[in-house]
Image (cartoon, helix red, strand yellow):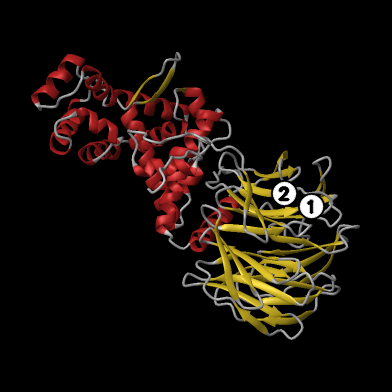
Amino acid sequence: MRLAQLSVDACEHLLAEKDVVGSAAEQTRLIETYVGNPLALKIVAQTIVELFGSKIAPFLDQGEIVFGGVRELLDAQFARLSAAEQSVLLWLSILREPISLEELLAVQGTPLPRTTVLEAVEALRRRSLIEQGKRLGSFTLQSVILEFATARLITETSSEIQQGQLSRLIEQGLTLARSPEYVRQTQMRLIVVPLLLQLRRAYPERVNLEDHLLALLKRLRARTGQRAGIVARTTWASAWSRPVASLAAWCVSARSRHAGYDAIRGNPAGLRLYRDLRCHHHLAFGVEWSPDGRWLASSGWNNVIQIWDATTGTIVQVIRDPDNPYTSFYGVAWSPDGQRLACGNNRQEVQMWEMSTCTRQWIAREQPASARRVAWSPDGTLLVSAGDDGIVYIWNASDGRLLKQLPGHQGKVNDVAWSHDGKWLASGGGNRDNGELFVWDIHSGERVRVLWGHPGIVYAVAWSQNGAMLVSGGSDGMLHWWDIQRGKRVRVCEAHQGTVQSLKVSPDGHKLASCGDDGAIMLWNLFSGEHLQTLRRDRPYERLNITGIRGVTEAQKMTLRALGAFEETSIGE
C-alpha cells in the first residue's frame, strides 16, 4: 500500500504546532519541497525553530534541504531498498528529468531484466520515492529524493575511485552524451564538478590524483564493451602553427567520451574557433604542428597517433605500435625538417617514425619509465625524452643511441624545452614537497642553473627566442618569468584555475600561449607579461552575474564560478 502524504491543511497545522512562521507562499514552498512527508516536516520544523528563529525564509534561503535527521531518514530508507531499486534511484538522479520505462532500460550500463526494473520502479512508487511525470508513462524523483540521491551517487563514486574500484563507474555514466544539452550541463554542474572537488580534497597533490585516475582509466579501457564516463575537462596541450598565427589545443570533454581538437585562427585581436574535431576516444595527451603548418599530429590513450590535414580537418594517417596494439602514446614532436615524428609511450619506450613511408625508424627501450615528453634539438641531430623516473635522456636522433643521462630531479619530469640556439635545455617537474626547475648545458651535461622557489610542481616550460628568459607554469596555476643569467624570478602572473598544462611561444617570439585545467587558452605578451586574450568555449554559466544571489551555499557558488559565473566586488573589498 502506497504511503499517504499529508494534505496542505494538515501540513500547515503541523508547522503551526511547531511554532514555525512564514508567509503563505513560504509555507507552500516548504511543504512542496518535502512533498507533504510528515516525518520529514517534523524534522525540518525542529531545525527551523532551533537554528533559524522559527522563520521559514532564512531556512529556504540557505539552500540545503537534505541534512541531519532528514538525511538519516533517507539513509535508512535507502538501506532497505534492493540492489535493483537502488540502481534505478541513482540512475534517475543522473537523468534528472521524467523518463519512461523504455528510456530507463536503454541507458543502463549493466542491463537488468525488464521485469526486475518494472518491479523496482513500482516498489519506489509505493515508497513515495518517485512520482509521475507530466508526460504520459514517465516518472521522476521528488526534489528532496533527487538531492539526496545525487549526494549519495557522488559520495559512493568518490569512495570507489579512492579505493580503486570500478563498479559504480561501469554501472552508471556520470554524464550521458545522448541527454539534451541542458541536462548535460546540469549533470556537469551538480554531479561531475562536485565529484572532482571531493577528489581534490582527498588528493591534495594533483599529480597523485592524476596518476590514480589514469590508472583507473586504463583499467576501464581494458573492459571492452563496458561504458565509462570521463569526469574532467582539461586543456592538456597547445601548439602554434608556424605559417599563420593559429593555435591548436586538445581538450578532454566531460560531456562525452571523446577528446576534441580545437583549432583557433585569426590575428591576436580577433582569434576565433575555426574547427572542432572529435577523434580520440580517451585522453589526448599531445598535439604538434608540422614545421610547414600542413599537418597536425595528435596522440593519446586510444593507442594511436593521428595525422591530420590542417586544411580539410581530415585524418590522413593513423600510426599504431606494430608490436603491441595496447600502447598508449604521450608527447609527440616533429623533427625540424618535418620528415620524422618522435613519440614517448607508456611502455617505457621512445619511438621514431619516418613520415614519408609511415614506418618506424627506431625504438629505444633504455628509459626505465614512461616517456611523457620528447623534444628535438633545433638542428635536428638530438632528441631528449623525460618522464616518470626523474631523469632526462639525450638520444642520437638518427639511430636512437643513448648519448647522455641527466639525473637530478627527485620527482617526475613533466616537460623539457630547448633554447633556440640549442645550447641549453630546461626541465621541469617535482614532487609533493616542492617544484623543480633546472637548466642544463647540453654539451657538457652539467646542470648550470637551479631556479629555486617554484611553488607547486612544474608542468610546463618555454624559452624566449633569445634564450635570456624562461617561463614556467605548474600546479599553482601561476606563470613565472625567470631571468636565466641571474637565476632569479622576475615576474609572476595569475593564470589558470588549476594546473598549467602547456606553454608555447608564438613563431614571431612575441606571444605566449598557456592552457590548463580550467579548459582555457590564455595569450600573453611574452616580454611584459600582459594578458592579451582568453580563448574558451562558453561554459554552462558563462558571464552569469550571481552577485547577491540567495538560496545557494558557498560550495554551490564555487561550482557556479567554475562554470563561468561571476560576482561583482566593490573596490576595497
Q: Nearer the viewer, residue 222 or 419?
A: 419
Vertical arrangement, residue 125 with respect to residue 184, above or below: above
Q: Using the rendered image of the protein, determine whether residue 282 is visible from the camera's viewpoint.
A: no
Q: Nearer the viewer, residue 4 or 155?
A: 155
Q: Name the amino acid type tagged 1.
A: Ser
Q: Residue at x 77, y 62 (%)?
A: 333
Looking at the rendered image, the quarter that the N terminus falls into is: top left
User: Residue 328 location, x and y as percent?
Assistant: 68, 58
Q: Most extreme residue toward the front, as rendered?
A: 571
Q: Earlier in the sequence, mark 2 or mark 1?
A: 1
User: Residue 267 location, x and y as percent?
Assistant: 76, 44
Q: Nearer the viewer, residue 413 or 52?
A: 52
Residue at image mark 1 = 241
Vertical arrangement, residue 189 with respect to residue 506, above or below: above
Q: Using the rendered image of the protein, determine whether residue 572 is visible from the camera's viewpoint.
A: yes
Residue at image mark 2 = 248
Q: Residue at x 47, y 27 (%)?
A: 114
Callout 1 secondary element: loop
